[in-house]
């Protein structure tokens, strides 16, 4: 049973560029959440997708957008990259139709903006 | 902003000793989960405790939850060098309608052989 998979593992982009990160949830999970983890900090919630719609959003600007596909996989897009967007981006999957289920994380994508 | 706080920020112990990490949160929750992270990579799920539970065990892990104090603790017994990692608690607030997780800054545990 494959867990949560993210691609790519590392990425280097230039300020002002756009980036797309990808996530496949754990088998049987229907919800994908994205988190940003700056160095030395805990992950911060970006947004959550369920049934191909954004269900809840954290305190992130509109430059951060996402998408969920019918097979539950998801993309995170960041436009007009800033140096401060450099971080580890984590995807988590869960089963929203059952309360109190564990959220499982992927290995993350390390984004460096230069 | 981060809701949770872990205490201590860093902990260094010898192999075989027990390690205790504490976590506080600010609002009412559905559940609280603990995660381990090695070298800035992905988060490994350790244990989930529901708001109506007070204690839970999993192998060498023991988690307690005190909703009146809005706090939780993670105890790792008989620690091993392989337990060296950062540990995060993540609370799931009842408000908001989704099951987003709110993390603290984590406790960095070093287990010396």
Image: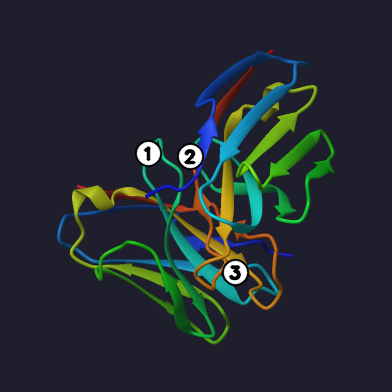
Q: Is residue A86 left or right of residue A108?
A: left
Q: How far apart are marks 1 and 2 (CA)?
A: 8 Å
What residue sits 59% from the left and 44% below the top?
B89
The quarter of the displayed image where residue A36 is located:
bottom left
Q: Distance between the residues labelled 3 and 2?
A: 20 Å
Q: Distance between the residues labelled 1 and 3?
A: 24 Å
Residue toward you, B41 or B60 = B60
| Above or below: residue B28 compared with residue B8 | below
Closer to the chain start, of discs 1 and 3, is 3
Please tell me the numbered disc located at residue A39: 1
- Where residue A85 appears, as percent x and y from the top left, is 27, 53
- Where residue B81 appears, as percent x and y from the top left, is 69, 22
- Where residue B21 appears, as percent x and y from the top left, is 63, 30
Residue toward you, A35 or B3 = B3
Q: In which quarter of the image is the N terminus of chain A?
A: bottom right
- Do tags 1 and 3 sit on the same chain? yes
Chain letter for the residue marked with disc 2 in the picture: B
Do callouts 1 and 2 mark residues in contact (Cβ within 8 Å)?
Answer: yes
Please tell me the numbered disc located at residue A5: none
Instruction: Label 3, secondary structure: give it.
Output: loop
What residue sits 66% from the left and 61% below the top?
A3
Badge 2 is on which residue?
A: B40
Badge 3 is on which residue?
A: A25
Callout 3: 10 Å neighbours few (<14), some, many (20+)?
many
Instruction: Label 1, secondary structure: give it.
Output: loop
């Amino acid at each position: 049973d494959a867990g949560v998979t993210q691609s790519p593992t590392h990425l280097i982009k230039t300020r002002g560029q756009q980036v797309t990160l990808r996530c496949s949830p754990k088998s049987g999970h229907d919800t994908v959440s994205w988190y940003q983890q700056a160095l030395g900090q805990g992950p911060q919630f970006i947004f959550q997708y369920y049934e191909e719609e954004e269900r809840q959003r954290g305190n992130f600007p509109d430059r951060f957008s996402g998408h969920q596909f019918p097979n539950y996989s998801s993309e995170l897009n960041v436009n007009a990259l800033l140096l401060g967007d450099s971080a580890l981006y984590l995807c988590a999957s869960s089963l929203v139709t059952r309360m109190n289920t564990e959220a499982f994380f992927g290995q993350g994508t390390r984004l460096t903006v230069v | 902003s981060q809701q949770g706080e872990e205490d201590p920020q860093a902990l260094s112990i010898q192999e075989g000793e027990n390690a205790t990490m504490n976590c506080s949160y600010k609002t009412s929750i559905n559940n609280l989960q603990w995660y381990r992270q090695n070298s800035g990579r992905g988060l490994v799920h350790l244990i989930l405790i529901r708001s109506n539970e007070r204690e839970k065990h999993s192998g060498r892990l023991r988690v307690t939850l005190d909703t009146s104090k809005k706090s939780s603790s993670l105890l790792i017994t008989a620690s091993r060098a392989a337990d060296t990692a950062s540990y995060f608690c993540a609370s799931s607030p009842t408000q908001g309608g989704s099951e987003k997780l709110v993390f603290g800054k984590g406790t960095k545990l070093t287990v010396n052989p």
